Image: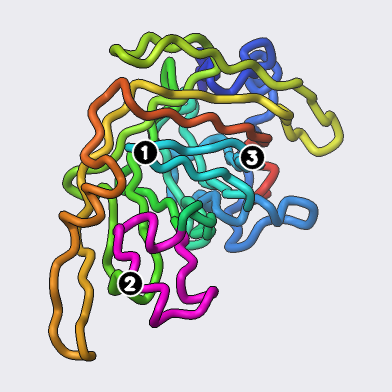
Amino acid sequence: MKLRRLSASLGLIGLIALLMTMFAAGAQAATPAPGYSQFAGCPSPAESPTTAVCLRSVVTSGHFKMGNKDVPITNPMTLSGGLDGNLRNFAKSPAGGLTPVKQTVPGGVIGLTGLDWLVNFLSLDGLKLYAVTELAGVPELGETLKLPIRVHLINPVLGNNCYVGSLSNPIVLNLTEETTSPPLPNKPISGHKGTPIFHEESGIFTSLNSEAVDNSFAAPGANGCVLTLFGFIPISINGLVNTASGLPAPAGTNETRQVMDMELVPVSRVYP
């Protein structure tokens, strides 16, 4: 099995040769072996015969700005799954993918919609707004870590299906540890590689505290945001959300920085 390289966005280029020695064939297993439970999102050989490497990446901090809304990443988000021998073709078990984690949106639902009168009807908790990042396609590893996503905006005022981005029109991030080349008015920004560690006993490669960035992506307008008056009259408020949030936002006006820890291990270690 041939490994060409890890993406620069993962910061482990110098460790590829070591991975090549770890792919011993083994029996299939339904659950990870003891000590590898964090890789439950990686598919077993029975689920994905082409998977050679299990991946777990945890975004620990950073921010996500689209339009005029800048959301700090304060609650860790985990992407887990598996890759083939060339570290491509992402696949996941039912436990894998991107964890649905709420991030608090500054300004709350009033800042999102501009509906100041909501303060007269909602409690402080009711005025809070949360954003949950969801996968809207299959991640791809190459020169960058390509993530097609949509952002679920959560508050009872907005209904259950208020999103920025969709499965047919996602926000597409191309995260890199290198320097970006965004369209104006954004200027280039740089991430940085993490600290690589190889745990010989477990066979796990770890990259700590890398920073991946992107400020070249576009953000579409909101969809599915509905205010229900008197409990039964639904009114679309996509336009209000777009106006108050500066959406849709063209490429060159948005930015994300994501500090992450990443783990890789041969699938034969997880499912021996």
Q: Which of disc 1 and disc 3 is earlier in sequence? A: 3
Residue underneath mark 1? 68
**Residue hosting label 2:** 117
Indicate which label's residue lies in the foreground, 3 or 2: 2
Outermost residue, bottom side: 231
In this image, 165 relative to 22: left or right? left
Image coordinates of residue 182 in percent, x first then y, are 34, 13
Rendered image quadrant of residue 141: top left
Residue 46 in sight in this render: no
Counting from the top left corner in percent of width and height, residue 201 is at 86, 35
Q: Mark 2 and mark 1: span between their CA atoms?
A: 21 Å
Residue at image location 63% in from the left, 16% down from the top: 192
Which residues fall within the magenta stretch? 108-130
Give yes or no for residue 136 being in the magenta stretch: no
Residue nearest the observer in this picture, 82 or 217: 217
Query: 183 or 5, which lies in front?
Result: 183
User: Residue at the spot x=49%, y=20% of the render?
Assistant: 176
- Dot 1: what SS? loop
* Image-based side of 213 in relation to 200, left or right: left
Q: Position of residue 149 (x, y in %)?
A: 35, 44
Mark 3, secondary structure of its residue: strand
Mark 1, Cα crowd under 10 Å, few <14 / some 14-19 / many 20+, is some
**Residue 106: % across, % down:** 50, 52
Q: Amino acid at mark 2?
A: Trp
